Image (cartoon, grey):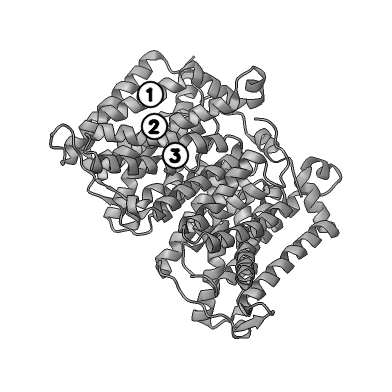
Amino acid sequence: MTSTVDTTAEAARPAPPSGLVAVVRAPRWVRYALLAVGLLVAIWLPNGLYPAVAVDILCWALFAVAVDLLLGFTGLMSFGHAAFWGTSAYVTGLVAIHAGLPFPLAVLAGALAAAVLAVPIGYLAVKRTGIYFAMVTLAFAQMVYYVANEWRSVTQGENGLQGVPRDLFGWDLTDDYYFYYAILPIVLLGLAGAWRIVHSPFGRVLVGIRDNPARARALGYPVHRYKLTAFVLSGFIAGLGGGLFAVGHRFVSLDVLHWTTSGKAVIVVVLGGIGTLWGGVLGAGIVVRLEDWLSFSGFEAIGLVTGGIFVLVVVLFRRGIWGSAAALARRLAARRR
Amino acid sequence: MSGFAQNTFNGLVSGAFYALLALGLAVIFGMLRVVNFAHGAFYMLGAFGAYVLLTEAGVPFWAALVIMPVGLGLLGMALERAVIHRLTRLDPLYNFLLTFGLTLILQDLVKLRYGVQSSPYATPSLLSGTVNFGLFDFPTYRVFILGFAVLLCVAVWWVLTRTRIGMVVRAATERPDLTRAFGIDVGRWVTPVFGFGIGLAGLAGVLAAPMRAVNPLMGADLIIVVFAVVVIGGLGSIFGSVAAGFGIGLVQAWGEAYLSNFPIVSQTIVFVVMAVVLLWRPAGLFGREEAPA
């Protein structure tokens, strides 16, 4: 029994709601106001939350934006981004431990390693689209997981990589509060980079490919190469997040490579709103905060809650928080006119 | 020589599990365009259900072999009606995400009640011991699994190609609109087919209970390997999925036996095969070429 697999899948893909791309952009003052609020929240965050949780939120924000770059703006759902997040976490940890470099350089090394790994995985994965892309990336990430699990001499296997230093030219960053402010510029740089990619001519082509790959090809764009470039960039940004996560926890465990980590990244994006970029940041804040609260209150079955969120969001709330808010704002604006 | 035969036999047995799971995935995908991430979770529920039935109600293996697939099949049908059905018109990615969420929920429910440790399940007495086919002693239970799985795959193939129901299902899979135009109610078959696929996963779980450690996570890692298997075989092709299932079982067993200095090989070889297939035939060994994208 054969069937026209991916063609129908492609045809069944609904036209993206116009809110996905910034076709109708909010007025300039609204965008600047939102940016200002976002920056203020970012600066205030460790005063309102446990600084360690705030650090996690920053790392996951980068991870989510990386996944959304593919899912929302290229139309590729990677279900294996833990491979890049986790690889960078391990490389960052190893570089920081053995080479004693200041942590930003270690994180950069980790992110570069993630980008390098993204080249072969992306090269193979972009040969398929839709649901197959998700399965292929998931499978390759699992392969990376097994390799890390077996390669005990380097990764310490199930014991994890312990004692990742937080060195920055001798400054004392052991307090999570100060560490938060040390990594904030790196995270903002990463987020700005993602924004820059999406709003560049390159990003426009990606959106074009997402909406109509056949047309993009007919216009002469090398579709595979664009997708691969997006994949590698996304791997790099996910790697930035993963590296910072490793330094933040001063510890790397196999969890960073597990398929549940990949899945969590996707749900963070869906909850925030696919194709909204900043929705992922919002989703990261909510999910990380919620999980911290659950584990703090001694609730063991965290998967029950994250799984439940997954089901509810997918069934009832597919636009996500940012997407719904944007749609609401647009409707209000239209009524006033 | 007997070593080779033994490895081949063991490969076919573990391939039987891949084949049964891949078969269920392929049937469901064909009819609903849904890649069921929760397939591994239902496999786990099959094994756990058999274990719970035995220890808490004294229900023997043979009864569990009927009760669990039927029960899980019904649960699957209810699930299809309740949620999956609502999302089938959308991008298949949404149902993938939905079933991923269900997997987390099912796993944690079982974990919450029974913990994460593995539970032993005794091989049914009728199937304990070994059979000798001349080369070496085959464990009877494994021979049973292999025979049962092959029989089941043949039966499904027979139903799909030789009966009216099978023709309707195949037609509905390949050209739903045209089938509808012939006056056949396609929607009627969607729920039973989904239930059937889930039932197969549950059956594989019951079969696995005496042979593998029964624990809440047993299905999770397995399903990712099965995803690789169906990418290799071509998810649109039922034959391809089954053949790839047995093939990967063999390749893994041989890799484990002859490259035993590299323990990593047996775990990762399936992904290496997948990479090669993606390079060589991106649509899968038995899949049809997809539209350029």
- Which residue matches tag 3? A271
Do tag 1 and tag 3 residues touch (Cβ < 8 Å)?
no
The disc labelled 1 sits on which kind of residue?
Gly
Q: Position of residue A140 (x, y in %)?
A: 51, 45
Question: Mark 2: which secondary structure?
Answer: helix
> Closer to the camera, B222 or A72?
B222
Question: Mark 1: which secondary structure?
Answer: helix
Q: Position of residue A333 (x, y in %)?
A: 46, 19
Tell which circle, 1 or 3, labels the residue nearer the N-terminal end.
Answer: 1
Residue at position x 13%, y 34% from top? A170
Q: Are marks 1 and 3 on the same chain?
A: yes
The disc labelled 3 sits on which kind of residue?
Leu
Residue at position x 39%, y 14% from top? A28
Q: Position of residue B64 (x, y in %)?
A: 60, 76
Question: Given this view, does label 2 or label 3 mark the residue nearer the observer?
Answer: 2
In the displayed structure, would residue A244 be above or below residue B77? Answer: above
In the displayed structure, would residue B257 be above or below residue A334? Answer: below
Distance in Å between CA atoms under marks 2 and 1: 9 Å
Do tag 2 and tag 1 residues touch (Cβ < 8 Å)?
yes
- Which residue matches tag 2? A237
| Occupied quadrant, residue A11 | top right
Quadrant, the N terminus of chain B: bottom right
| Occupied quadrant, residue A117 | top left
Q: Residues within 10 Å of mark 3 (few under 14, many from 20)?
A: many
Residue B24: in sight, yes or no?
no
> Closer to the camera, B255 or A20?
B255
In the displayed structure, would residue A189 be above or below residue A317? Answer: above
Tell which circle, 2 or 1, labels the residue nearer the N-terminal end.
Answer: 1
- Which residue matches tag 1? A193
A301 relative position to A6: left or right? left
